[in-house]
Image: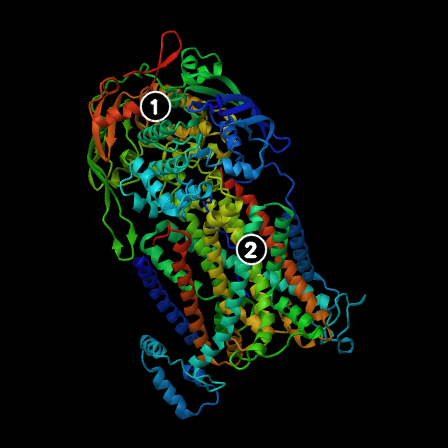
Amino acid sequence: MFRFILHRLGMAVPTLLLISVMVFALIRFIPGDPALLMLGDMADAQSLAQMRSSLGLDHSVVTQYLIWIKAVLSGDLGFSISSRQAVLPLLLDRFSVSATIVLVAVGLATLIAVPVGLLAAWKQNSPMDLGLVASATLLLSIPSFWLGLLLLYGFGIKLGWLPVVGYVAFADDPFKAVTYLVLPIVTLTLVEFGAIARMARASTIEVLRLEYIAHARAKGLSEGAVLWRHALRNAFAPTWTLVGLILGNLLGGIAVLETVFTLPGVGRLMVDSIFARDYPVLQGCLLLITCIYVLVNLCVDLLYPLFDPRVKL
Amino acid sequence: MSAKRTLPAAPTLAVPAPARRAWRYPPLNALIGGSLLLGLIGMALLGLVWTPYDPLRLDLASRFQAPSAAHWLGTDEFGRDALSRMIIGARTSLWISLLSVTFAVVAGTFIGMLAGYLRGWTDRVLMMLNDALLAFPGILMALGIMAIIGASQYGIVLALGIAYTPSVVRVVRASVLSLRELEFIEASRVIGNSELYTMFRHIAPNCLAPLCVLATSMFGWALLSESALSFLGLGVPPPAATWGSMLAASRPYIASAAWLGIFPGIFISLALLAINLFGDALRDRLDPRMRK
Amino acid sequence: MTAPAVLLSVQHLKIRAGVEGPLAVDDLSFTLAPGEIVALVGESGSGKTMAARAAIGLLPAPMQICGGHIEFQGVALDSADAQAMRRIRGAQIGMVFQEPMVSLNPALTIGRQMSEALKLHTTLEADEIQQRCVQMLQRIGIKDAERCLASYPHQFSGGMRQRIMLASVMLLRPALLIADEPTTALDCLAQLDVIELMLELTREQGTAILFISHDLSLVARYAHKVVVMRNGKAVEQGAIQDILLAPKADYTRQLLEALPRRGELVPLPVAEGPLLEVQGVCIEHPGPRSFWGKSLPKRVVHGVNLSIAPGETLALVGGSGSGKTTLGRAVVGLVNPCAGAIRFKGIDILKAANRVHRLQCQMIFQDPYSSLDPRMRIGQILAEPLRHEPDMSAAQRRERVAQTLVDVGLAEHFVERFAHQLSGGQRQRVAIGRALVRRPQLVIADEPISALDMTIQKQILDLFERLQKQYGFACLFISHDLAAVERIAHRVAVMNQGEVVEVGERDAIFDSPQHPYTQQLLAAASPLEKLSGGGYRIRTG
């Protein structure tokens, strides 16, 4: 078991390294003077010169990369051009907002979708099952930003139940903070419910066809026990993979929901930084999000043996 | 917004048989999905030659008109006919999606087959690169690339194409890996065929099924991504009309001119629904053959 | 209270798919007394599995009982409600399935799966349950029972899993055990093992067995009664000796005829030297790959020496894991030996330069369902090997393909068909045709008939014999079943754990086997022999 963990960690390190190279290269490829890009148009000659030497622009590209990665590993991701804040604290701050929404929404969606999918697979082709498939497919097809807009319109403007714009930090006022988070979380939950429910249903149908299910029934187990104890474990594995994929994608995709609900999350930060040509922030965002993606994948992989003991390496 | 809005095709043992001659009545989801899709494609093609009004023509006198006989879907903040813009939007969105999916499929199949068949160091290196690329969620990749190239139609195509190639590589490689173990591949080598020939003659055609299903799903992702990017303002620059940018533009007026926000969303949803239904039907058709 | 005379009674059972589908089981009637062993024998599509599933109430979804009765210990099973059925299942009627690889849940430990049924049907305490499981595992020969209980199914081999399944089913001491082809997926020695175990356990507890099988010779040894089924109908039934001595129905006779018997061999041509020589060949499988390089390779073939004369059939027989398939694959070039030489007519075919000569050895694969490319038409599949015959024109190739189709007994129009449109037997004919289309001098047949029904097996062996007479190719016939090769092998080589333990002429091997392993294999082979009066009897000694 320990070897397995070590092995997966070992595989992750080269990927992280490669990602850092890609992010570095991506920003370097942007046309223009790198020092100017990092400092913005308003910088004076002296700071430009300073920046040039600290970036190591008179050395080879490899050296520049090494200088950069060294700074990154010690927590220095530069300063935002627009707000003059240090990038790393800014990123972490914003990321906590996005992470809250994503984790709660996906968690809720999984908790609801998996049992529903299981039940639908058990009663395949019943009205309930067909109803689930239809609604899941429909939900799957609605873009999250549109759904968000509709909900905002319905609950925020027409009914006035929930606030429309802005955000309150949890630490400041828990109750109010929740009201600001309800709509985005509900939107995201609805949107991801479709995909997860369908996958749970499909993989359960697969599993129910297999012989060990017949064997379990032959022992005299009730259908509930068969579903819960035997089917769920095996059916959950592909669903778990999907959840990992969804989490990864939402890291970038959350930007649209944050735009709709004007939330200070990392997605919107990234988009804003592109418009503002705030390259230090953009670079930081890219790096953070890709590394988190690799970590999420790692967690998904590490938890896999819980569902499928056959998985070794 | 998630790039994976439709189910990723599980790389199962891909040994489907070619379609039979006899056509039984197609299932419901194929019918609905297929007809919706045809309708949208028809709309897009129509836009190449004719629209009710000039989509770019400003008519400040008739701003914010609700849907009426003259303007079926109303007018926007510049007085432009919403229906015409919707039709043009269809063309743009579908075209960009198609191009990016084609790019991803061609590049991904080539790399995936190489990795899966040759194995060894080629495989390891390619997969490491692939995993690193996969770590850039679709929209991130697009954002990054467009920060360099700048926003343009072909920039988006390139960005989305590169973003989706890793998924294709994964699926193709998995197909190849499972096919390699099948006896007819071994038989090909025993007969005396070279590795290259076996790869093209035997493995490639049998990868088609999961590839088709994936391509259909990716078409949906691409459409959604393109809309999302446009919504964020990072898509094809104005005054070009895309569904996403129309949706974004409608936000300030959501209280007063709700129709501006409703219709683009409906069209995007219909397009995605069509692709999902059609993709499902396709998967069902190709899938059962995989079992004896 | 006296034991009832009839444990299970099936009367005029009819099962069909849905409301209008064809009948899977048509008017089946038989009875089972306590402690009796009744075999349902038939080929694929005979309905035997459906009948068994109906008895335990586990018919797959579209199938339903549309006529007749099933009574178990006086209780009507066909009309029992779900809860009553569940009480009977496991406790009164136990079932063992065919595929040991998939009949245990891969995500749960053995211990959990074994104790589950006990927990459900009895009121025993947890440690008492644990005790019983341990005892049962020791009973079936597992030494470290505690560790076994904590392990997962994938850590055991197929034969072991089947024994564990048996053990867990018999833990509950059911009155009836339904065994649905429990040994079909195992090689013949493991088969014997499992069946003997089953008999022991059931004899101890007085359990009756309903044994489903496609292999009449297998059940002949153990069953008291036999019901022969075909296309859903019971063609003949009665005590096993009666059926064997005087089979009444034509189909029963056909099944019995299909059992391979020693006959006259294809005459050998005069030869100067051996066609194929295998000298001191060792083959290793690479070890499992890990991040820091490969672990130790595993040697599967140790220094094997064999030779095959032109036109001769050498049978290579052994259990699973004996290395016979690997050796066959080495001859055609799918695996590379790490030591030793393989010579074809004196030429070393391990060298890449001699590839042309290697092509004189062709292979027929085991699984008719995966050895043909599903995307190619039969004609294309047969024509493909001719790519390497540079001197043939397109017209000559077409002719050769047509000739090959005739040779393997398929009609002309098969050229246009796809593999999935053919039955298992037909596909195997195509595979044979593909191997022979270039008229090779040596054909390696890797268990070519194991996956087929008995009567089809006979047809394929007939075909093989005819083709060998016609074209005079030599053959390396690999099989795990000694009985199957009795008919066509000139010489037999027996392999065990990577080594050849005995080689000899056919008659010598079958009549007086020397090596204990060969004797074991022979004991596991078909026990039936034909009598002069036309009937059969179980071979003694």
> What is the CA distance from the residue labelled 2 to the residue labelled 1?
51 Å
Q: Name above or below for residue C19 compared with residue A52.
A: above
Where is residue C468, by image quadrant? Answer: top left
How many numbered dots are placed on residues in this image?
2
Circle 2 packing at 10 Å, graded few (<14), some (14-19), many (20+), is: many
Which quarter shows the C terminus of chain A?
bottom left
Specify the farthest residue to the right.
B69
User: Residue placed at 53% from the left, 42% from the top?
Assistant: B288
Residue A75 visible in the shown view: yes
Q: Name above or below for residue C38 compared with residue B55.
A: above
Q: Nearer the viewer, residue C257 or C438?
A: C257
Residue corresponding to mark 2? A197
**Badge 2 vs badge 1, beta-carbon distance below 8 Å:** no
- Residue B182, image x, y percentages: 40, 41
- Residue C340, image x, y percentages: 19, 37
Residue corresponding to mark 1? C484
Identity, as a three-letter code, of the amino acid under mark 1: Ala
User: Residue placed at 46% from the left, 35% from the top?
Assistant: C380
Q: Name above or below for residue A301 compared with residue B260.
A: above
Specify the farthest residue to the front.
C1
Residues beneath discs 2 and 1 located on the same chain: no
Identity, as a three-letter code, of the amino acid under mark 2: Ala
- Residue B28, image x, y percentages: 65, 47
Which quarter shows the N terminus of chain A?
bottom left
Number of the label disc, if any, that sits on residue C229 = none
Please tell me whether mark 1 sits on a helix, a strand or a loop.
Answer: helix
Chain for mark 1? C
Please tell me whether mark 2 sits on a helix, a strand or a loop.
Answer: helix
Circle 1 packing at 10 Å, graded few (<14), some (14-19), many (20+), is: many
Chain for mark 2? A
Q: Nearer the viewer, residue B259 or A37?
A: B259
- Residue A69, image x, y percentages: 34, 76
